[in-house]
């Protein structure tokens, strides 16, 4: 039996819906975490980033209007970016899929194939 895939998910996001359809076509039903209402903690984010091999800025949606309006004029430390994501989860890239000790930002077939 394969290990569960957790998917940080927004049901209004076309990339999230694409990833969900991709997984279901493979016979995989991920555990969906609607991160806008079930926001990951700073510790959760650190764990995810470790699995992704990325820094906090790499999962910030810098083209999001909220980011542009409120945060784009300043640079932040890694910890400050983590707190921004927790306070404003809409800033987090999506979908992020986590399985055991690896994770991907599942925006295309190639990255989704890496998690299955």
Image (cartoon, rainbow, N blue to C red):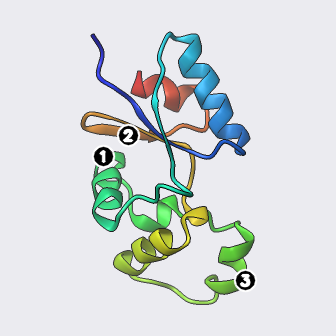
From what the image shows, is residue 97 above or below residue 35?
above
State how far apart marks 3 and 1 are (Cα). 30 Å
Which residue is under mark 3?
A: 69
Q: Are marks 2 and 3 in contact (CB under 8 Å)?
A: no
Looking at the image, which residue sits at the far front? 37
- Nearest to N terminus: mark 3 or mark 1: 1
Q: Are marks 1 and 2 in contact (CB under 8 Å)?
A: yes
Which residue is under mark 2?
A: 103
Question: Which quadrant: the N terminus?
Answer: top left
In-front residue for pair 114/23: 23
- Nearest to N terminus: mark 2 or mark 3: 3
Give the secondary structure at mark 3: helix
Q: Residues within 10 Å of mark 3 (few under 14, many from 20)?
A: few
**Residue 32: percent from the left, percent from the top?**
49, 37
Q: Which residue is at a point 67% across and 33% down the rendered structure image? A: 17
Question: Which quadrant: the C terminus?
Answer: top left
Which residue is under mark 1?
A: 51
- Nearest to N terminus: mark 1 or mark 2: 1
Give the secondary structure at mark 2: strand
């Amino acid at each position: 039996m394969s290990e569960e895939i957790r998917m940080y998910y927004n049901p209004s996001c076309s990339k999230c819906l694409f990833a969900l359809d991709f997984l279901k076509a493979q016979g995989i039903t991920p555990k969906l975490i609607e991160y806008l209402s079930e926001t990951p903690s700073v510790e959760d984010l650190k764990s995810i980033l470790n699995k992704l091999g990325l820094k906090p800025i790499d999962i910030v949606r810098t083209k999001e209007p909220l980011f542009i309006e409120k945060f784009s004029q300043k640079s932040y430390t890694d910890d400050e970016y983590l707190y921004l994501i927790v306070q404003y989860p809409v800033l987090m890239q999506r979908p992020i899929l986590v399985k055991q000790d690896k994770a991907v930002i599942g925006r295309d077939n190639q990255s989704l194939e890496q998690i299955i």
